Image (cartoon, rainbow, N blue to C red):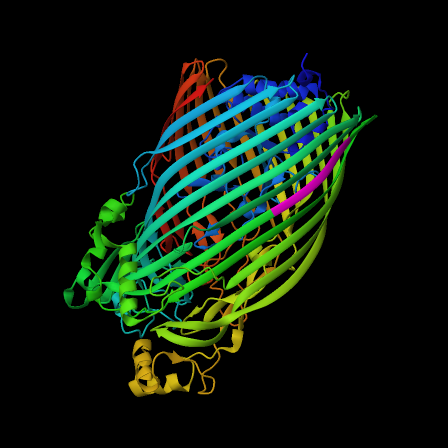
Amino acid sequence: MSKTNEFKKKSIAVAIATVAGISGHALAQEAQDAALEEVTVIGMRASLEKSADIKRDAQGVVDAISAEDIGKFPDTNLAESLQRITGVSIDRQNGEGSRVTVRGFGPDYNVVTLNGRQMPAANLENGTASSSRSFDFANLAAESVSAVEVFKTGRADQPTGGIGSVINVRTLRPLEQSDTILNLSAKSMHDTSSQEGDSVTPEFSGIFSSKFADDTIGVSFAGSFSERHSGQAGSETGPGWYTIPGGQWDWGSVNPGHWNYDNFENVPLEGDVYSMPRGIGFTFSETQRERTNAILTLQWAPSDEFEATLDYSYAEQDVEHQYNSMGAWFNGDPVSGSFTEGTGNGSVVAPIIYTDGTNADVTFNAGEWGTVNKNDSVGLNLVWNPREDLTLAFDYHNSSAENGAKDDRGTNNNIAGVQFNREATTVNYGYDLPAVSFEFIDGQGFDPSQMLTSGNVFNNAYMKHDIEQARFDGTFDVDAGPVKSIDFGIGRSESTNRSAFANVQNDSWGGYGTAADYDDSLFVQKSMADALHDFGSADSSEMTPYYYASDFDGMRAAIAAIATANGDVLSPCGPVLCASNDFSTDRTAVETQQSVYAQVNLSWDDAAMPMNLAVGLRFEDTEVDAKAKVPVYDRIEWVGDNEFRAQTTGVGFSEQKGAYSNLLPNVDFDIQVREDVVARASVSKTITRPGYGDIQGGQTIDSLLRFNGGNAFRGNPDLDPFESTNFDLSAEWYYDEGSYVSLGYYSKDVENFIGLGSFSETTFNLAHPAQGPRFEEAAAALGTNDLGAIRAYLEDMYGSPIVGSAADGDALAEFNVLAPVNEKEASIDGIEFAVQHMFADTGFGTQFNFTTVDGDIAYDNFNTNKGEGVENQFALLGLSDSANLVGFYDKNGIQARIAYNWRDDFLAGTFDGNGERNPVYVESYGQWDASASYDVQDNLTVFFEGINLTNETKRLYGRHENMMIGAYQTGARYNLGVRYSF
């Protein structure tokens, strides 16, 4: 008999092994049998049966997804598999599952672990470093995963940080396998969202696992490579919406006495609230991604009492991104239109048709950049049984994630192409994607011979996150009456998160050179109807029939030629536009965590209704050290009609510290009411740590100001973590093999929610050139408050650019400073219902589940959040109901599945555009996916997968559904492949 079959551990060590990431080879004999069953019984049905077994046997509330076979997970993406679980919803990036929300709590409230180890994350969002702690599932190929477990209730032995859940991703362990394994897979992907990329891209994966030396040494390797070309097209209100109480005079307001009042229908009444758009635009992007994954695992079990596992994982995403956009900004010049009908008694009113008379430019922006995201982790764990009643486990890992620019283009950039003869813009907000038309001076239209560039921005962001973690766990088998065992452990981790940022910006918004300096071929006319084919408004008579895509490389070269001729230095690359590696903002937050826990496990197996009780307590102490290098500013220059730029003189340094400690108890009870019925009750306390952006030190400002001031942000390392008291009650009826019905109730009372407080401050004491007697005298002399005219007048008198001067009486610029604060308490509760049914031996089966999420604090759309000393609203983000329906067939070598996932509207943010205090809602979304496979031979399978079969679109809106913030199409995706097992 091999040592694998001789090797016996106590069953209580299963819990330690799961958390610490150690092999089932070191567990009890029954754990070995379960692992063997997992790899020898394959297919959709076997996967669902295995997941049901995990749910039934778990401590607390746990859901899981198991691989259908080695190298074959139910979905092509882990996040898309997780959304099938009750209470789990996902966020999509480029049409692909990226991050998860559990029971209404978003990605920042869920901890993702790999084999029980918390993984670092280094994500870039809109060209800046993300503050999120959540692991991006797009980094990890599904082919290397054996199971994903979602722990919804707190446990003393689990890593902290997940109020929503702890999600553990398990990978293959060679000593768990019964035979040598070699699986290879290849597939082609067709992504309909891409208009410019390859129509078909490849993906390859392979897994090898074997044992040697009388099954005492095991080696496994899983690797994959995938290439995907995708696109996204849509519309955005990038500058946001400006909210106004009805009857009040303000920027862009329409009231009795307004010169165009009679041109509007259903003008908002006093007692209503309405918003006016600050601009409108269309975006068209293309993305090419190459993803490489590799996991190497070595195991050694020289005796029945000892096992060692050494593993290394690597993931890399190489991403190229190109975009074009066309749009217009509004300066609050309402000409005509209509509004939804208000009541004058607390209703929110929105534009239906709106014409803005801002006489300025139409922009044709272009950007192109590349990023590389790398993750690697090396880990060691040891399991030792010094005696039969004691199991000890040690686990250590050093993991790193890094994300940054590939070259001098930076991580985000924009070159603005312009045509300056726009007279008016009309928008119909009655469509999901607004229809837009432009009017030009003297009846002209779009004309490439009049197009040139204006300002440009090259951003460079960098993020690196390191986690070094060690833990020691043990289980002592007591077996004294109902007390069966005691679990205990200590741990220490150090998390270092660095985010850095540099900005190169040229504020030539009035135009750089002349239109003659730019070849007409740089601005290419394209069909709006073709680009936005999933929206009905795209071919409407109210929509401009085409847009212009500007050539990024061509504009960059033309600008360099002009700069060379003029002797201008535009960037660190001289006359050539490029990003800077000299980071003006550089922040590092170091969190040192120490923990200790103990848990007593009791069981009454001989009772009429067998019961289990686990009582645990975890103590954690956390210290935060935040250091920052941030820009220092000395003046404000007037660089555009309503654009003012704070100019930096260098950098300053700051350091702030914080600390907190938490006691986290948990009680889990389950009772077998009948042989096939399990009831559960759990009480626990869990925490989620503040986002990295919140705890990082230093204060920064948005260097671009407006007439009424600017925005600034300050971190707070002394924030307390979110702390949640959780209650769970559930019942599960396992009425047949693989079939069950479950109903559960959960509630979470959460303290220390972190919101953005805001206050006004004259940061850096910068004089504002449009807030003083010089401005007032110019306005009086000209008889107008037109900013462009006043700027020209002052430049004639004082030269260009106009610089704010306290000596000349200019007032100090007011900045709206946003700072994270622990604000309020809130509660959520909900119901989870799930049914899984196998139709005997017909091969057919189905799953259905839904989750409700209710919170006690909702956003008040009527509250404008304006006024002296008024704070921004606090509201719970991400709360929404969700549902899943899956039907499948699995028999005689044929597998087929169709799945529908739905998520209701939810609040995603409380700021839009230029920092306006407005809600951002995500519209309800449902998606159909399907897959099918056929076993040509025992070891050869062909398969097909389809994602978003009905081309569903995504939409974001503000206080009213007509207040479109974003509307996007991503299209369907199809995969065709083959899998071979040797």
Identify the image quadrant of the N terminus.
top right
Is 895 on the left or on the right of 26, as rendered?
left
Closest to the observer, 194 or 308: 308
Residue 182 position, x and y percent, is 50, 21
Whether 68 is drawn above or below 447: the answer is above
User: Residue farthest to the left?
Assistant: 443
User: Residue farthest to the top?
Assistant: 1
Residue 314 seen: yes
Kindly identify the residue that appears in the image at 80 percent across and 23 percent down.
Answer: 388
Q: Quadrant of residue 929?
A: top left
Whether 665 is drawn above or below 820: the answer is above
Q: Main SS of the magenta segment?
A: strand
Taking the magenta stretch, the answer to whether it contains residue 487 is no
Q: Quadrant of residue 13?
A: top right
Kindly identify the residue that appears in the image at 24 percent across and 65 percent down.
Answer: 424
Is 351 on the left or on the right of 766, as rendered?
left
Q: Which residues fall within the magenta stretch?
A: 467-475
Residue 828 position, x and y percent, is 59, 46
Residue 429 seen: no
Closest to the observer, 215 or 911: 215
Residue 911 position, x and y percent, is 47, 59
